[in-house]
Image (spheres, rainbow, N blue to C red):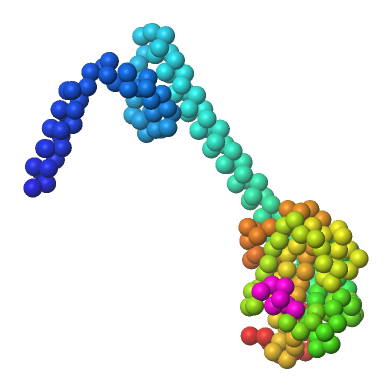
Amino acid sequence: MSQQNDSTEAKRIDDTEATLSADEVKSYLRLHPELLANDPDLISALVPPSQSTGRNVLDMQHFMIGRLQNQVRMLRDIQSDLIEASSLNSIAREQVHAAALRLLDARSFEHLIEYVTTPDGLARVLGVRASTVCIETASGVSGIGIRGVRVLEPGGVDRILGPGERCRLSAHVRGSRGLYGNLAEDIHSEALVRLDFSPASPPGLLALGGFDPEQFHPDQAVDLLEFLADVVERCVRQWLDLPPAR
């Protein structure tokens, strides 16, 4: 049955070819000049004749060569984008690893918080404008620094990130004074990461604010940010002798 169908299809194609003259094909192409431009497979299937067959053949070869050159340029652009993205990822990884080592080197809890929250500490290593740690308290007072830690009202972390969410990256934002204090006006993008210190303590938030509106954006990967938050959590637990969160 399959062989019969194949024979029928081949006969139909032969009949179609027999009914189309060269002039009809030319007329169709003149009425549909975009056909070749929009069908790269058809272009690839064409057999370019020699240059000696006439001016029109030279024009066709020029078109085919131009199309191939455009494809080469497109592939070069893609390669350049991949190299740039790889380089940026490498730089970000080195920054986060350097920051993690500094966190582990903290001499006390106060020194740890100072490193995380001052512009010359974690913010400088990560290349951001501001870095802060926030924690929920039962007082409901927001925006007051306690030993360098900023205070959020109960449920503030879920309100900012969304219930159960770990991270939120945003571009083109207006910095919050509750998170960044007097640096808020310099913040135009941000990365926010939940901190789960312990079942015995309220949740917290690591806030990184960038001066560049595109420094953080929702399409970025968050694995390095989550790793950094994990290190901060462990350091806080170690200095405050808290039980593990998980």
Point out residue 152 in the picture as x, y percentages from the top left corner. Answer: 80, 79
Point out the stretch of residues depicted in magenta: 156-162
- Residue 157 located within the stretch drawn in magenta: yes
- Vertical placement of 178 versus 18: above or below? below
- Residue at 8 percent across and 42 percent down: it is 4
- Residue at 63 percent across and 78 percent down: it is 164
- Left or right, 144 with reference to 47: right
- Vertical placement of 215 versus 45: above or below? below
- Vertical placement of 148 versus 34: above or below? below
The answer to which of 12 and 125 lies nearer the viewer is 12
Point out residue 73 in the picture as x, y percentages from the top left corner. Answer: 56, 32
Point out residue 161 in the picture as x, y percentages from the top left corner. Answer: 69, 72
- Residue 116 located within the stretch drawn in magenta: no
Residue 107 shows in this picture? no
- Left or right, 209 with reference to 53: right
Residue 2 shows in this picture? yes
Outermost residue to the front:
31
The answer to which of 144 and 69 lies nearer the viewer is 144
- Left or right, 13 with reference to 28: left
- Location of the C terminus by quadrant is bottom right
- Residue at 14 percent across and 40 percent down: it is 6
Question: Which of the 4 image quadrants contains residue 133?
Answer: bottom right
